[in-house]
Image (cartoon, rainbow, N blue to C red):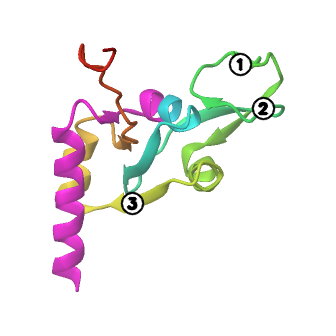
Amino acid sequence: VLKHKRDRQREFVRTLLGDSRNAVTGIDEVLTQLQQGNARSIVVAKGLSADLQRCLNCWWVDRTADPRCPSCGGKRERASLRDLLPDLVRRYNVSLEIVSGNSADALRRSGGIGALLREFEKKEYSAFAAG
């Protein structure tokens, strides 16, 4: 069971780090994509810590030190990534995978956190479709 878990974590991180089109890494980019509804899965290295600011009005979360929310201008409070991430993934209906060992080490080299993005349907228009 433990080997299966490690293999799954390794494959998840490999997919995340190898897909520059449908994945992002780093706290700032992950938080932005998550809150814009573009993330479908979050993977985080066990023990990753960061100080964040959360708006008390609209709940926007980021790492900027500004006491006012960049989204709505509301007052913000300090909180840790560890405290806010579970609430964020529930709020945006996103899966969360916490990785450890070699998988966490590989992820830490890319910011310690990543997100696989939702694949939005692309509409292709053919020159023949108009006729």
- Amino acid type, mark 3: Glu
Read off the residue under disc 2. 58
Label 2 to label 1: alpha-carbon separation: 8 Å
Q: Of the residues under marks 2 and 3, which one precedes in the sequence?
A: 2
Give whichever of 106, 8 is nearer the camera. Answer: 8
Label pair 1/3, CB-CB below 8 angstroms: no
Q: Which residues are magenta?
A: 1-30
* Count of all numbered marks drawn on residues in the image: 3
Label 1 to label 3: alpha-carbon separation: 28 Å
- Rendered position, 71 above or below 34: above
The answer to if 90 sits in the magenta stretch is: no
Give whichever of 11, 131 is nearer the camera. Answer: 131
Q: Residue at x 19, y 78 (%)?
A: 4
Q: Residue at x 44, y 48 (%)?
A: 40
Mark 2 packing: few (<14 Cα in 10 Å), some, or many (20+)?
A: some
Read off the residue under disc 3. 97
Residue 122 x %, y % = 34, 30
Mark 1 packing: few (<14 Cα in 10 Å), some, or many (20+)?
A: few
- Rendered position, 27 above or below 81: above
User: Is residue 48 visible from the viewing direction of this image?
Assistant: no
User: Is residue 60 visible from the viewing direction of this image?
Assistant: yes
Q: Quadrant of the N terminus?
A: bottom left
Answer with left or right where residue 76 lies relative to residue 19. right
What kind of element bears circle 3?
strand
- Rendered position, 103 above or below 78: below
